[in-house]
Image (tube, rainbow, N blue to C red):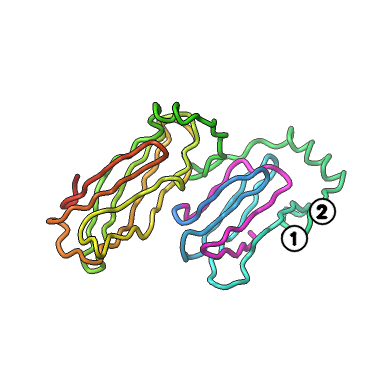
């Protein structure tokens, strides 16, 4: 297991010779993971304790310890190479080409190795998203958003809102594109959406679902049971309005 040093607000790239197919991450709620060709990008959502990360390629499985730090000497780019002694070598700088002998060994490994058994918490490799015309997008309900419950933390002036989100089409849904506008209470001190956290950040196909939590700061709220908060949730042409009063809508 090799250390990878991350920083909130910054992206770290893991670059492999073979194409990653799956990722299993310990604290998946606090890291955003994306695939770009042979790269895996990781961005911590906040300062969290150490976690572990496993990346499955066609021939190998790689292990890392993710260390989230608040200083400047974090890792921007980590180039990962598989060594003969079942270890991982991390290099910076330009790519060094794999020796021809090693390439032949990897080609033989395809028939010698069976695919790894993956944990159910793995993040699926992304599926290409078709480009839809604006007219077609208006006729498709890409996802559904269902309110589950709200929790009012009076001492901290925080409202926690739990949602369930389901993909309705065989198209990639990236919840980073979900927009939430919070309205209500004193207009002079409006509600503030502090954070959106999802169990899974991407829903590649129909029926995939995830749970999410919105953390909303209500600076002037005194009794949430007597006041209304409106959530306007949009995803492209989808628009869902939820009014919360006393923990229901």
Q: Position of residue 161 (x, y in %)?
A: 28, 52
Q: Which residues are magenta?
A: 1-28
**Labels 1 & 2 near each other (Cβ < 8 A):** yes
Q: Position of residue 235 (x, y in %)?
A: 40, 41
Mark 2 closeness class: few <14, some 14–19, many ≥20 residues within 10 Å: few
Left or right of residue 193: residue 49? right
Left or right of residue 32: residue 194? left
At a point 44% along the width and 27% down the height, the residue shown is 135
| Marks 1 and 2, how far apart at CA | 9 Å
> Which of disc 2 and disc 1 is earlier in sequence?
1
Name the image quarter holding residue 168: top left
Residue at which label 1 appears: 91
Left or right of residue 238: residue 89? right
Q: Position of residue 65 (x, y in %)?
A: 58, 60
Which disc number belongs to residue 78? none
SS under mark 1: strand
At a point 54% along the width and 69% down the height, the residue shown is 69
Which disc number belongs to residue 96? 2
SS under mark 2: loop
| Residue furthest out toward the bottom | 71
Name the image quarter holding residue 136: top left
Left or right of residue 58: residue 221? left
| Residue furthest out toward the right | 100
Is residue 58 within the magenta segment? no
Is residue 2 within the magenta segment? yes
Which residue is nearer to you in this view: 159 or 109?
A: 159
At a point 77% along the width and 53% down the height, the residue shown is 83
Mark 1 closeness class: few <14, some 14–19, many ≥20 residues within 10 Å: few
């Amino acid at each position: 297991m090799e250390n990878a040093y991350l920083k909130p607000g910054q992206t770290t790239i893991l670059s492999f010779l073979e194409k990653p197919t799956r990722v299993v991450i310990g604290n998946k709620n606090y890291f955003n993971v994306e695939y770009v060709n042979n790269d895996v990008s990781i961005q911590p959502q906040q300062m969290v304790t150490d976690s572990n990360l496993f990346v499955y390629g066609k021939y190998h499985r790689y292990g890392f310890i993710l260390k989230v730090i608040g200083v400047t000497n974090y890792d921007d780019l980590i180039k990962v190479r598989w060594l003969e002694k079942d270890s991982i070598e991390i290099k910076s700088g330009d790519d060094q080409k794999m020796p021809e002998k090693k390439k032949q060994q990897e080609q033989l490994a395809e028939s010698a190795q069976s695919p790894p058994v993956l944990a159910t918490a793995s993040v699926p490799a992304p599926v290409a998203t078709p480009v839809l015309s604006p007219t077609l997008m208006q006729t498709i309900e890409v996802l559904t958003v269902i309110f589950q419950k709200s929790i009012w933390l009076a001492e901290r002036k925080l409202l926690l809102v739990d949602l369930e989100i389901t993909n309705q089409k065989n198209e990639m849904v990236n919840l980073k594109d979900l927009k939430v506008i919070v309205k209500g209470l004193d207009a002079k001190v409006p509600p503030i959406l502090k954070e959106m956290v999802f169990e899974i950040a991407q829903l590649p196909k129909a029926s995939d679902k995830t749970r999410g939590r919105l953390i909303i700061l209500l600076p002037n709220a005194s009794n949430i049971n007597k006041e209304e908060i409106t959530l306007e949730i949009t995803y492209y042409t989808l628009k869902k309005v939820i009014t919360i009063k006393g923990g229901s809508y």
